[in-house]
Image (tube, rainbow, N blue to C red):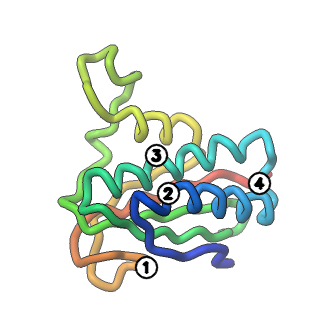
Amino acid sequence: MECLLQRRFTARELPLLRVRVEECAAWAGLAETRRGDFVLAVDAVATNAVEHAGGEGALLLRRVGDELECRISDSGPGFSEDVIPRILPGLDGATSGRGLWLTRLVTDRLAVSTGAVGAVGAVGAVGAVVTLAMRLR
């Protein structure tokens, strides 16, 4: 396991965060054809953390075996994977969830859990931890 990037962020820092994630993904060897999808997915989850969970989050980006894994945590109310739409939001009457739906679509692995005291990268004692990953090859 190799840590590539670890930082807290707010809405103001999202543009720089996208750049840093793209740079780290390239350095880790994520194929250029998948890199844009990875950055888009990370941005969607990070934006959700800022918009729905108190205005800040924490990101941990690491290489784990043959995957590039990103864990984003926040101190908001938390949520479960059940809220992620199965079909494109809007077609089923949903008015939100497009970012998470897209993240599930383009990544190889997506998991949602509740934050906990001492969780790696956790901002607070509650909230959500969203882990997404893509295979490097």
Is residue 40 depicted above or below 50 in this figure?
Answer: above
> Secondary structure beneath disc 2?
helix
Which amino acid lies under the numbered mark 4 shown in the image of this protein? Answer: Leu
> Secondary structure beneath disc 1?
loop
In the rendering, at what x and y percent does residue 60 appear? 52, 71
Q: Quadrant of the N terminus?
A: bottom right
> Is residue 103 or residue 11 the one in the foreground?
11
First in sequence, mark 2 or 4: give its number. 2
Which amino acid lies under the numbered mark 1 shown in the image of this protein? Answer: Val
Q: Given contact means CB atoms under 8 Å apart, are the residues at marks 3 and 1 in contact?
A: no
For discs 2 and 4, the disc positioned in front in the rendered view: 2
The residue at the point 70 percent across, 52 percent down is: 135
Quarter assignment of residue 98? top left
Inter-mark Cα distance, 1 to 2:
20 Å
Inter-mark Cα distance, 2 to 3:
10 Å
Inter-mark Cα distance, 4 to 1:
23 Å
In the rendering, at what x and y percent does residue 105 appear? 53, 34
Q: Tag on residue 120?
A: 1
The residue at the point 34 percent across, 56 percent down is: 50
The residue at the point 41 percent across, 51 percent down is: 47
First in sequence, mark 1 or 2: give its number. 2
> Secondary structure beneath disc 4?
loop
From the viewer's perspective, tell me whether residue 137 is left or right of residue 111: right
Q: Tag on residue 9?
A: none
Which amino acid lies under the numbered mark 3 shown in the image of this protein? Answer: Ala
Inter-mark Cα distance, 3 to 1:
20 Å
First in sequence, mark 2 or 3: give its number. 2
> Secondary structure beneath disc 3?
helix
Give the number of marks: 4
First in sequence, mark 4 or 1: give its number. 4
